[in-house]
Image (tube, grey):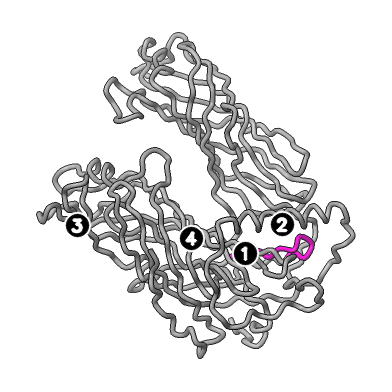
Amino acid sequence: MTVDARAAARRPIHWAVGGALVVATALVPGAESAAAEQTSEVSLRYACPFPSGPEDVDVVVSAVLPTSARTGEEIRPDQVAVEVSLPPTALARFADLDAATLSAVARLTVRNTVGDRYADASWQDLTAPPTALPQPGEGDGEGEGELTLTATGDVPTVSFGSPGRATLAPAALALSLSSLTEAGEPTTPPGLDVACAPVPGQEAELAAIMVRGGTDPTAPAPRPGESAPAPDPTPTRPAEGLPPTAREKIDALTEERLEGLEDDPGSCPIEIPPEWVMTTAETYAAGYANAAKLDGAAALGPAFMKVVLNKRYINDSCASTVDVSSEVNFDYEGRRQLPPTKATFLSYGFMPTTATMTLEQVGPPAAIHTHTVTNTPTYPEETTVTAQLVMRLSDVEVNGVPLDVGPDCRTERPFEQVLKGYGQSYPPAGYLVAYGGTLTGYAHIPPFEGCGATEDLDPIFTSAISSPGKKADNYTKMTQAPLCVATNPEGPDCPPRKPKPER
């Protein structure tokens, strides 16, 4: 498309680019979608009365939800999953019945809240397929003898009638467990119904959705006391990073403005939005990632990224917020991946292990969401970057001896990397998408598969690299260079520079 550089220059810089989607793993280095979705997950402990006695059960609830919606808009949670980990004592009953597999139907109560109003929804008929019961001695560590059932399915939609910060929080959980023998016949008795309640004192929020009024203005919001769009920031580099409380400040300012609109709903005039400009940019990112199990860090990048800016732009003058979604793809020799990286660690604390790792980007383009609050002169903003990656290992040597891992040694499934950055526009400080800066986050590395040409090496790499349980324990710190934007090819940031990573 043709972009008017003069028109683009008149608009405030609230581009979302988050150019650092790299995650750590043990051997070598390791965005919100264009539709502004979020993948949400919460881990909770439930008290469940089994025949063997009361048991505390670990439950992980996850779903894909929008980050924002309009009042009255129908919201449908997608990719809903309820993962229940049953301890060995809770499974003893089924072993006594000579059961070979166990399945479940879960019914989860979810409390939907906005302001001081709430309503409970029932996520029913979430089904977990038959899963083989563990045999004595199976498993390792604290998960030995444990059985995990993952229930999935469609759930009802929800809509909120009032603007504000809406939350979804899991509450009561009912499980209908069914057991089958080795021959596929129901056991006697065939099943068990269990009603569980969350253990008190936990933070149960699954997701937060910003609910706004029925209008959808997308014009750049004026700064306080002005009727015209805000001027661009002066072309100076951001100052030092903002304190860790930046996110809380952004949330508080958003809440304050929304509460004020409830008290005086007529204070927000309807605006006719102008056409918004979508353009492209390029940048590099580099950094370091901790390898949690190996107590070390690996250098990442520099990774080259192609960015599409402003895929979606919502300037809500009623809520005094600007939300921008953009897309980014890694590019290494024409492939969607980071450059292969070689690193050496002391595996298990004593054995030098060297490997080449390649991080491949999978699925849709990595997506970035920037949320800016415009009812304060500094324009504070939070940027969230989310990507799906697969890790491949090759050229492995242990204590100097080559280890043939084969051509397809990789994580058994893609993993999600989420990085966040905080900044402000006036004066520029912290992380800003146009000027770059530092983003940080954690990732959960799944087990490995396909490793070993002549023997199964999956357990070795899983033991040495993968995160335990559900913990996202690999910390990443990335530095993004300023954007080289297509509308300003002669600017000081073109061609894009490779940044100096920060530890």
Residue type indicated by callout 1:
Glu
Tag 3 and tag 1, C-beta contact below 8 Å: no
Circle 1 sits on which residue? 381
Circle 4 sits on which residue? 364
Residue type indicated by callout 3:
Thr
The answer to which of marks 3 and 1 sits earlier in the sequence is 3
Cα gap from disc 2 to disc 4, whole angstroms: 30 Å
Q: Does the magenta stretch include residue 10?
A: no
Q: In this view, does 58 lie above or below 370?
A: above
User: What residue is shown at x 32% (from left), y 64% (from top)?
Assistant: 299
Q: Is residue 323 magenta?
A: yes
Cα gap from disc 3 to disc 4, whole angstroms: 31 Å
User: What residue is shown at x 64% (from left), y 84% (from top)?
Assistant: 9
Q: What stretch is highlighted in magenta?
A: 316-325
Foreground: 493 or 407? 493
Counting from the top left corner in percent of width and height, residue 269 is at 86, 66
Local SS, label 1:
strand
**Disc sitting over residue 254 in the figure:** 2
Tag 1 and tag 4, C-beta contact below 8 Å: no
Residue type indicated by callout 2:
Thr
Mark 2 burial class by Cα count in 10 Å: few <14, some 14-19, many 20+: many
Circle 3 sits on which residue? 354
Q: How many numbered marks are there?
A: 4
Badge nearest the viewer, 3 or 2: 2
The answer to which of marks 2 and 4 sits earlier in the sequence is 2
Q: Is residue 344 toward the left or the right of residue 241 in the image?
A: left
Foreground: 54 or 252? 252
